[in-house]
């Protein structure tokens, strides 16, 4: 996916040429520039003359001097929108993004529908990862975003990341139709189709992406799609082909391990996770997945060591702390004070990092139950149930906890909710497998 500044290299002239700009040659000589400067100096109150100098500097990509002359223009004529938009543009290209943002917001106060301002504010929001805001701004920019070859892929990515899949697909279809086609565009379009529950169209489009480019990202996207739709055998076929071309790819090795693990072949999964760890020792996901696989094999102490390593690599990775607590509990923390203390610290850290994690609250409840702190356990299970209302496992544990406390009415009501939640779930999937899927 496109991120960050991928769309920031926009030709200045393509989005910021106004009527006054037409009088400035693209190939302006130093003598011509000097002449424009002298003309502006002879007429210190002439905003048009000042703006011409600013545009001349901008065409030479001397954005610092351009900004100075646009500021002079606005000092003379504060309501001159062309100068204000040009100022925002050169501030953007000179790296003064915050100042550019303020300038374009000021333009929108004066002209709410201005497409140039919406375009740059969309780029700024996308750069910050504010995809919903970026999508709104690109929509407001209209054809300046949807038809500009330097921006339209970023706009499509904003729609995709914001969950506006129909708009993303529509724009990506136009991008592909206009050409030249790229694997990235096909992969994004396939994701948009998949998110709209059109798996066959997604499959066909992913295949086109891989046919165009058998690089890591195309193969990885298609393999993940295949895994998510239960076709792990085909995913492994794709990954085997990709690995043969890119032997150093930790991502492909990791995904191969996930595919094996989801099929229940943990021995093969372990081999791939170990290879991925060796290829990328500072990436936390391979040791996390390795540890999950060991937990599946009933080896909690070995798994705990891997989760500690993942937490050391990425202290902000909530899953590493949560999984460490789970491994310690399975490894006897209920009866071992040292392990229980470590598990408590780990799960509390997970909750601090991700307060809305129902699973973490449920694990903390399990620790409280081990020390017979039933009221505290109930509070955590209630919190877990609020955060994940349809979690059948949490509802069952909460019902049992109420019953142990003699709260029969609440126990019965929660048990009914448990039966309903269990009935709605098509497949009661292993908790660790759920985490492994999300580790992709």
Image (tube, rainbow, N blue to C red):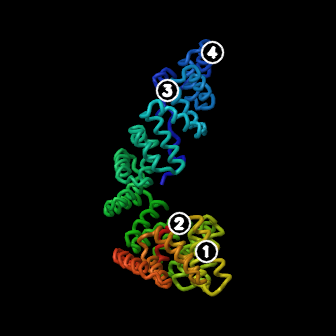
**Disc 2, SS:** helix
Which is nearer the N-term, disc 3 or disc 2? 3
**Who's the residue at 36% across and 52% down the image?**
169
The x, y position of residue 376, in whole percent, is: 56, 76
Instruction: Check whether the beta carbons of the residues at disc 1 and disc 3 lie within 8 A of each other.
Output: no
Which mark's residue is nearer the viewer, 3 or 4?
A: 3
Image: 245 above or below 141: below
Query: Does 173 sit left or right of 261 as displayed?
Result: left
Residue located at (59% from left, 22% from top): 75
Q: Earlier in the sequence, mark 2 or mark 4?
A: 4
Pointer 4: residues within 10 angstroms few (<14), some, or many (20+)? few
Question: Which residue appears farthest toward the top when viewing the image?
Answer: 42
Q: Is residue 429 visible?
A: no
Name the disc covering residue 81, or none: 3
Q: Secondary structure at mark 1?
A: helix
Name the mark on residue 307: 1
Residue plotted at (38% across, 72% down) = 231
Q: Nearer the viewer, residue 318 or 282?
A: 318
């Amino acid at each position: 996916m496109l991120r960050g500044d991928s769309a920031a290299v926009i030709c200045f002239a393509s989005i910021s040429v106004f009527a006054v700009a037409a009088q400035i040659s693209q190939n302006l000589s130093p003598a011509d520039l000097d002449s424009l400067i002298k003309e502006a100096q002879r007429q210190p109150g002439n905003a048009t003359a000042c703006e011409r100098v600013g545009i001349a500097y901008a065409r030479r990509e001397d954005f610092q001097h351009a900004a100075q002359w646009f500021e002079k223009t606005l000092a003379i004529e504060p309501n001159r929108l062309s100068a204000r938009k040009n100022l925002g543009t050169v501030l953007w290209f000179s790296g003064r993004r915050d100042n550019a943002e303020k300038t374009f917001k000021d333009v929108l106060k004066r002209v709410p529908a201005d497409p140039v301002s919406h375009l740059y504010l969309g780029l700024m929001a996308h750069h910050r990862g504010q995809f919903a805001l970026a999508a709104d701004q690109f929509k407001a920019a209209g054809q300046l975003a949807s038809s500009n070859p330097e921006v339209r892929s970023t706009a499509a990515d904003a729609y995709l990341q914001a969950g506006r899949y129909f708009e993303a697909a529509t724009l990506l279809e136009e991008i592909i139709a206009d050409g030249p086609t790229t694997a990235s565009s096909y992969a994004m379009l396939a994701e948009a189709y998949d998110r709209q529950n059109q798996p066959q169209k997604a499959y066909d489009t992913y295949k086109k992406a891989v046919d165009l480019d058998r690089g890591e990202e195309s193969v990885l996207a298609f393999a993940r799609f295949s895994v998510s739709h239960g076709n792990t055998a085909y995913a492994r076929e794709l990954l085997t082909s990709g690995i043969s071309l890119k032997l150093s790819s930790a991502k492909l090795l990791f995904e191969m391990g996930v595919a094996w693990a989801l099929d229940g072949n943990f021995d093969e999964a372990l081999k791939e996770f170990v290879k991925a760890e060796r290829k990328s020792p500072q990436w936390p996901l391979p040791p996390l997945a390795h540890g999950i696989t060991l937990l599946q094999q009933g080896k909690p102490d070995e798994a705990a060591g891997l989760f500690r390593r993942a937490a050391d690599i990425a202290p902000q990775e909530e899953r590493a702390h949560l999984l460490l607590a789970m491994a310690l509990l399975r490894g006897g923390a209920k009866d071992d004070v040292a392990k229980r203390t470590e598990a408590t610290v780990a799960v509390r850290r997970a909750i601090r990092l991700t307060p809305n994690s129902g699973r973490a609250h449920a694990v903390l409840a399990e620790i409280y139950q081990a020390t017979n702190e039933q009221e505290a356990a109930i509070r955590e299970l209630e919190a877990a149930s609020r955060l994940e209302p349809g979690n059948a496992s949490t509802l069952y544990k909460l019902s049992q906890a109420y019953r142990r406390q003699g709260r029969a009415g609440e126990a019965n009501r929660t048990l009914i909710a448990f039966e309903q939640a269990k009935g709605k779930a098509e497949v009661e999937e292993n908790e660790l497998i759920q985490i492994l899927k999300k580790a992709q």
